[in-house]
Image (cartoon, helix red, strand yellow):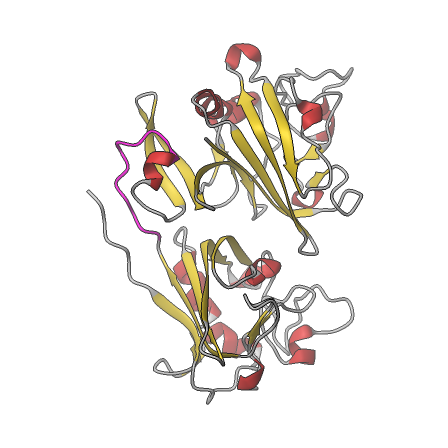
Amino acid sequence: MARLRKKTQVVFRRTVGNVLFNNVWTSYTNGFGNLDGDFWLGLDNIHHFTSSGQSVMRVEMEDINGQTGFAQYSTFLVGSPSSNYKLIVSQYAGNSGYDAFIYHNNMKFSTKDRDNDLSSSINCASYYGEPWWNNDCSRMMFTRNNFNDLGWYNWYTGSYKQLSKIRMMIRKPLIVETSGCSDCDCVGSLTTESGIYEITADGNPLQVYCEMNDGYNWMVIFRRIKGDVLFNNVWTSYENGFGNLDGDFWQGLKHINKFSAAGWSVMRVEMEDIVGYYGYAQYSTFHVGDASSGYRLTVSGYSGTAGYDALSIHNGRKFSTKDVDNDLSAINCALKYGSPWWNNDCGLVKFTLNDFNGLGWYNWHTGSYRPLVRVKMAIRK
């Protein structure tokens, strides 16, 4: 049985230009404007809607020449008041030309009277008159009072262009009956929407995150975007999997082994650092052995923009945790550094530290380690 798509809730709209948006903190928490015209629904309301589980968010825009574009995100979450309504947003799809929203991922909301941005010199909301989840200021000009200043960074024309209409909507994911499926390719034949699906693996139900992107059906096997899940875990946790599929999680070595053995042997790592630089590393050969091999890693065929092939040094290595030492070092690297992985003489990939601020990829394209705020590993056929 398939269920219908749940109702869409509009949370922000500017089409008329008769409402001022450079407002104070309490206005943004409670909401303001006219629901039949320009309005902001309120951070409290948006938090309440998104806190009940995975939400999909879509931004629809039209520029002054009548050209339209959209950006859709399969993961969208606004945190609680105690987090200053911290934003979690990822899994972009659309035709807006650039993923401008991702620059604001993990940012707190700021207004002219509440400065939570990362700029060391100014309050971006006050200086530019644009309350938002500002990073080192903004790549989205949605909340300026001047209706003629609305914009989206690197609009598909290749530069800022004045927008005349903006609408943001959120909804729950489409729920599709997938009990007859054994992988994300099957799911992709039923829907084009990324999200959490239940498939059958070895005769048992298994929840997976399928991502339909660039014409491929990917299965996400590891993700860190929130920082609310501890990753320095024991062997059985890494074997079976842990975390939350709508946030940070590890799919489980025994499951990754089954899928890679079944031909899901292309693997892609996507990363973003603290200043918004994005990079990826893709491998044409990826396989994780079975339990008797210590879940030995086979990986080769690098291409990408990450700057350095940091994963290949782990090729041929068994997995190690703080309670099972399979690395080549005189010490247990996973125990000493708190980084379970396919460690060699320790490692060049720091993805599993408990400290979310310690995530890193050796010789990132900047030429050195730089803290990462978003990491994802996915596999496909």
Relative image position of residue 241 (x, y in whole percent): 48, 29
Judged from this view, the residue extending furthest toward the top is 292
Say which quarter of the image contains residue 246.
top left
Identity of the residue drawn at 51% across and 24% down: 253
Question: What predominant SS class does the magenta segment belong to?
Answer: loop
Identity of the residue drawn at 64% across and 78% down: 113
Residue 174, above or below 70: above
Residue 334 visible to the viewer? no
Residue 231 visible to the viewer? yes
Image quadrant where one finds the N terminus: top left
First to last magenta residue range: 173-184
Specify whether 139 is left or right of 240: right
Relative image position of residue 285 (x, y in whole percent): 57, 26
Judged from this view, the residue extending furthest toward the right is 367
How many numbered marks appear? 0
Residue 243, above or below 152: above
Image quadrant where one finds the C terminus: top left
